[in-house]
Amino acid sequence: MDRFFTQKLCYRCGGSLENGRIMSMFNKECICMECCKKEKLDKDYDKASKADHDEIEKGNYNYKGTRG
Ligand SMILES: [Zn+2]
């Protein structure tokens, strides 16, 4: 988690994170907004999003994600 805020480049595409960073819904990778948009088009996004939400409801804030 500490690396999330210090990371300079998108973990996935290597692009700059200057325009915003977000954690992947599938794992703990720090990605750029462009990759986030692409991730939302993934057929498994809804499933991953729901799984993440369910884990948080259970009190697990360290859920690694469906692909973590
Ligand atoms: Zn990216």
Image (cartoon, rainbow, N blue to C red):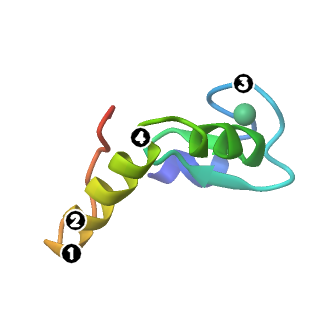
Q: Are marks 2 and 1 in contact (CB under 8 Å)?
A: yes
Give the label, 1 or 3, closer to the camera.
1
Residue tagged 3: 13
Query: Between 38 and 57, which is closer to the camera in this rendering?
Result: 38
Query: Between 18 and 67, which is closer to the camera in this rendering?
Result: 67
Seen at 51% across and 45% down, the residue is 24
Residue kind at label 3, given as amino acid type: Cys
Query: Between 38 and 4, which is closer to the camera in this rendering?
Result: 38
In the image, residue 32 above or below residue 68? below
Residue tagged 1: 57
Q: Earlier in the sequence, mark 4 or mark 1?
A: 4
Neighbor class of circle 3 (other Cα within 10 Å; few <14, some 14-19, many 20+) is: few
Residue kind at label 2, given as amino acid type: Asp
Confirm if mark 3 falls within 8 A of ligand 1.
Answer: yes
Q: Secondary structure at mark 4?
A: loop
Q: Earlier in the sequence, mark 3 or mark 2?
A: 3
Q: Secondary structure at mark 3?
A: loop
Residue tagged 4: 26
Seen at 72% across and 24% down, the residue is 13
Residue kind at label 4, given as amino acid type: Phe
**Residue 25 location (% of width, % of height):** 46, 48
Q: Are marks 3 and 4 in contact (CB under 8 Å)?
A: no
Left or right: 18 in relation to 30: right
Q: Tell me where residue 65 sits by quadrant.
A: top left
- Residues at marks 3 and 4, CA–CA distance in whole angstroms: 15 Å
Left or right: 43 in relation to 14: left
- Residues at marks 3 and 2, CA–CA distance in whole angstroms: 29 Å
Residue found farthest to the front: 43
Q: Secondary structure at mark 1?
A: helix
Residue tagged 2: 54
